[in-house]
Image: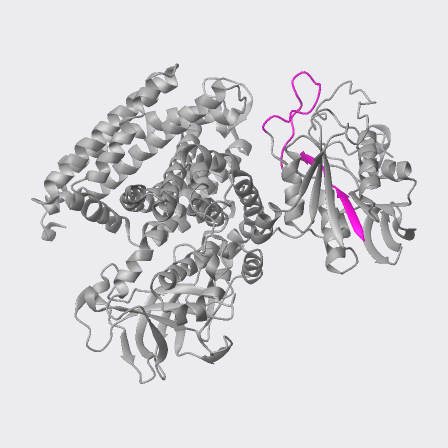
Amino acid sequence: MSEYYAPLRDMQFVLKELAGLDAVAQLPGCEEATPDLVDAVLEEAARFALEVLSPLNYPGDQEGATWHDKAVTMPAGFKEAYKLFVESGWAALASEPEWGGQGLPKVVAAAVGEMWKAANHAFSLCPLLTTGAIEALVLSGSEELKKTYLEKMVSGEWTGTMNLTEPNAGSDLAAVRTRAEPQPDGSYKIYGQKIFITYGDHDMVENIVHLVLARTPNAPEGVKGISLFVVPKFLVNADGSLGARNDAWCVSIEHKLGIHASPTAIMAFGDHSGAIGHLVGEENRGLEYMFIMMNAARFGVGLEGVAVCERAYQRARDYARERIQCTDIGVRGGPKVPIIAHPDVRRMLMTMKAYAEATRALAYVVAAAHDAAMRHPDEGERKANQAFVDLMIPVVKGWSTETGVMVASLGVQVHGGMGYVEETGAAQHLRDAQISTIYEGTTGIQANDLIGRKIARESGSTLKVVIEAMRALDADLAQQAGGHFVAIRNRLRTGVDALAAAGGWLVATYGSDVRAAAAGAVPFLKLLGTVAGGWLMARAALAAQARIAAGDSDPFFVAKIGTARFYADHILSQAPGLASTVTDGAEGVMALPEDMF
Amino acid sequence: MKILVPVKRVVDYNVKVRVKPDGSDVDLANVKMSMNPFDEIAVEQAVRLKEAGVASEVVVVSAGVANCQETLRTAMATGADRGILIQTDGELQPLAVARLLKAVCEKEQPQIVFCGKQAIDDDANQTGQMLAGLLNWPQATFVSKVAVAGDQATVTREIDSGLETVEVRLPAVLTADLRLNEPRYATLPNIMKAKKKPLETLTPAALGVDVTARLKTLKVAEPAKRTAGIKVADAADLVLKLKTEAKVI
């Protein structure tokens, strides 16, 4: 079985040429992130991904996490791998130095995070959820809560969870029913059941810190009456040592399509004596706190899409090189050739490679903008970058993960019948990829967020800025010689025009016919992803051409231009079709009344 | 006690090497480079000796192009205290490297020079031995176990007939074999700290060493492609074929 080799060359290229790592390293607090340090970090992370996490991916899937007597046992090897992960300091990569983190920029964390996800999706969820819980505490927790929990969570010695969903409160969190009753000592007792709690219980660490959404007795109805609580698995004594077992139990885990090694817990709070919890921030503001960190969590899930594109591509490529079948097309009686020689297999591999590179480019560019939004000394720059991040987060999440499923499916297809059996590992990527389009907000939720909060609410002003940046590339592209650049330029122009037209229609329609706008939300999200990917692949081709012109003979640059050409003709070419689906598709979507289904 | 560990930047062991079309050398353009795995083992052992309180300082040294700095930083990220780069762009053969190392030893006065037993690019397996000869120091090669007490090292060597245990008086040159240890992963905090550790750059000229190549490479060729195997009828047939056709027994 082929293992995962982090695509260091492309990661370094995207960081430097597209995401502007040099500029990020100029930001206050990011001075340590010099290119040589980032290279060293990426190389060692790649080694850890290859040697420790990747070999556990398939056996972890086959064995799965198991549940017995209110406790979860992880598949063989996970506990040791997690220990090594913590000891090596990877858990603390991007957290605040104040709590023991290394404070590296988001854009570096994005590249390293992509490696964990690609090497072992199920494993990577544990640090992802812990990071989310840390952010919620950093942003909203009292000093006492921070002191009690943050250091151990940042180091990874304790892990964190996010307890939002209940059987009747999924995408609609207004329906949360878990109760929190104030106690005389200022703590609360939590009663209720939560489902779909990723890493809600496991045996890799001694304590798990649950962040739980619940209602206090006189809270208002709906989303304005939800508060956030810290509920540890083991209570923490004043001196930091572990105290009594809290009344928070994993009563079962789910049997799922994929990510079998990631325990998805059903959590029961307060079945016996009441689970002791502490309020985070103020009462009734829980959802607001959750949404602050939601962007980060959604970005992290979007990276899973990037990661599975790369992982599925590598496996399919390796197989296509080895699998000998048929003679070259058009050659009679010639030798049998590896299937990578066949044009349709090549088309599939190019599709996978092009999507991996385009989704990566978008994710890292957004991560770098996030760093600038947090740290740039100029307020205008901070605002502009934050607006770009807000616009693009649902695209990174929605587009990259939908693309991941498609690419993982192609990975199975390249393997033919062998892809449909589990031993090749291709099927696991497809099974694992599907969840990324669902958790932290389904693609539909992302698309609604995109067209409503991120576009219509501000009359498309940030979208217009992005479109102008895309158009500004035309002059550079026009100056390049050769058929590749002619195609890239033409497709980008057509694609950007289609995006502008559909965006204009959305802004005009959202106020007057929100149902029509919503019917086209997902096609619009795909359109924006597709065109943004085309824009960044065009920028990548220009950067590669500049390096070639400067005498660099690395074949990577030739491949980059060829891949950008492929993206233009095979993927960016879909933009006008998607745009017309946005503007004309609502009639068909709503054509049948409910009873005709 | 100071330990000096020479580290070589070589083609990464995962890379499938290609020969240049003109047969002059292996093609190194755009190929991933890493620390020679046997040198990683030597660094690890030196760091363990330091952690055990036997050594007080671990100095890593590399000879070659400017990018060897990365190799030195990698070694420092796993625990070496400082690095020395002897920067030169030309070809370096084992004798030249041994002479450079001798000059560094005279400067640094280490008690142990811990080399990898060989580098995975040219597989020469000469530098450590030559260095011991030039310094007129004892040597113990192919080390799979080492214990240091006072000015004496007790060393287990992997040899064709099994394991041999010898004692060497320090200062000495040791060369690490595969089973000596399993190198640790660099931790993220140590990778970041490595950047701030001292790294000194020297030149062969400054050390007064002539690194001119003494050997001339006539030709570099790919190994012969393996041909399909055959089925043999029985053991006797196999022995016969090994004797008469393969001529290996």
Number of numbered callouts drawn = 0
Q: Residue at x 51, y 76 (%)?
A: A241
Magenta: main secondary structure equals: loop
- Camera-side residue: A358 or A4? A358
- In this rendering, position of residue B12 left or right of residue A297: right
Q: Position of residue B130 (x, y in %)?
A: 87, 35
Q: For residue A388, which quarter of the picture? A: top left
Image: magenta residue range? B1-30
Residue for point 22% across, 35% down: A464
Q: Say if residue A364 shows up in the picture.
A: yes
- Measured as percent of width and height from the top left, residue A48 is found at 57, 49
Q: Is residue B18 magenta?
A: yes
Where's the C terminus of chain B, which quadrant? Answer: top right
Q: Residue furthest left?
A: A512
Residue A532 image position (x, y, % from top left): 31, 34
Q: Which residue sits at x=39%, y=27%? A: A564
Q: Say which quarter of the image contains residue A535.
A: top left
Q: Is residue A315 left or right of residue A430?
A: right
**Relative side of A221 to B227, left or right:** left
Determine whether A377 is above or below A236 in the image: above
Name which residue lies at 85% across and 37% down.
B131
The image quarter in which residue A269 lies = bottom left
In the rendered view, tell whether residue A589 sits above or below residue A492: below
Closer to the camera, A77 or B243? A77
Find residue A190 and report its horizontal and vertical position in percent: 32, 77
